[in-house]
Amino acid sequence: MVIVDDHPFFRQGVCLYFKKNEQIEIVEELSDGIEVLEFLKEKHKEVDVVIMDLQMPGMSGGEATREICQQWPKIKVLVLTSYGSWDKVYSLLNSGAAGYLIKDANPEELAAAIKAVQTGGTYFGKQVKEALLNKVNMKGTENDTQEEFSDLIEPLTDREVDVLKSIGQGLGNSEIAEKLYISKNTVKTHVSHIFQKLNVTSRTEAAFYAMQKGLIES
């Protein structure tokens, strides 16, 4: 894992906490988007998760997230920042971020978020979920997002709804397979069908759809 934040004290605090966690190894701490892109050019095979702040000098975390998701799609970006406005949240999720968490989260929640994205799932902090749900529930304003999901190409089956709920809960394919007592390959097939029917390209968008439709609690 790599942590990218322009505040050394914060980076060191995160590193110190995770030194006690044998399942999470921090291979580097960096201070801006340019540094992380340069690092990943050489070391991307050693990294599965990047914890990304947004507001940093030089290249912002938003720009770096888009580059990482395009160049190294296997690397999961977990945004960890001090604010969670709708525009920022949806822009980052559209860019491919697998999760979004506000910095006032406790260390245990950060560990849970890392585990979720590490295993192929998604994670939204409580404030982030509220920002998303408040946006889609607003009346009298333009909402292109609702239009994107207004008509399904084909209705979801009951099992696909179960899988979609699990995606919305942040579970990866292995966890969904265990929860629903089906094979991992079957989960992959359901996920592929869900993406086609919802006309989405990522688990993050699918999870957002699940929240929008009230399939999971905020």
Image (cartoon, rainbow, N blue to C red):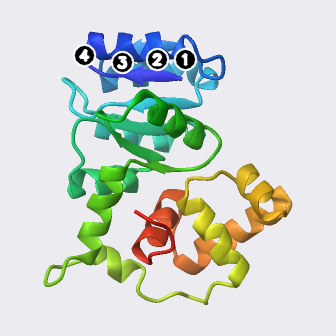
Q: Which residue is mark 3?
A: 35
Q: Which mark is residue 42?
A: 1
Cβ atoms at labels 1 and 4 below 8 Å apart: no
Q: From the image, state whether disc 1 or disc 4 is nearer to you.
A: 4
**Cα distance, mark 4 to mark 3?**
14 Å
Closer-to-camera residue (88/46): 88
Q: Residue at x 48, y 57 (%)?
A: 204
| Mark 2 crowdedness (10 Å alpha carbons): few <14, some 14-19, many ≥20 | some
| Left or right position of 211 against 83 | right
Q: Earlier in the sequence, mark 1 or mark 4?
A: 4
Q: Earlier in the sequence, mark 4 or mark 2?
A: 4
Q: Which residue is mark 2?
A: 39
Q: Secondary structure at mark 2?
A: helix
**Cα distance, mark 4 to mark 2?**
18 Å
Q: Earlier in the sequence, mark 1 or mark 3?
A: 3
Cβ atoms at labels 1 and 3 below 8 Å apart: no
Q: Which residue is mark 4?
A: 7
Q: Quadrant of residue 161?
A: bottom right
Residue 90 position, x and y percent, is 31, 57
Amino acid residing under circle 3: Glu
Cβ atoms at labels 1 and 2 below 8 Å apart: yes
| Mark 1 crowdedness (10 Å alpha carbons): few <14, some 14-19, many ≥20 | few
Q: From the image, state whether disc 4 or disc 3 is nearer to you.
A: 4
**Cα distance, mark 1 to mark 2?**
6 Å
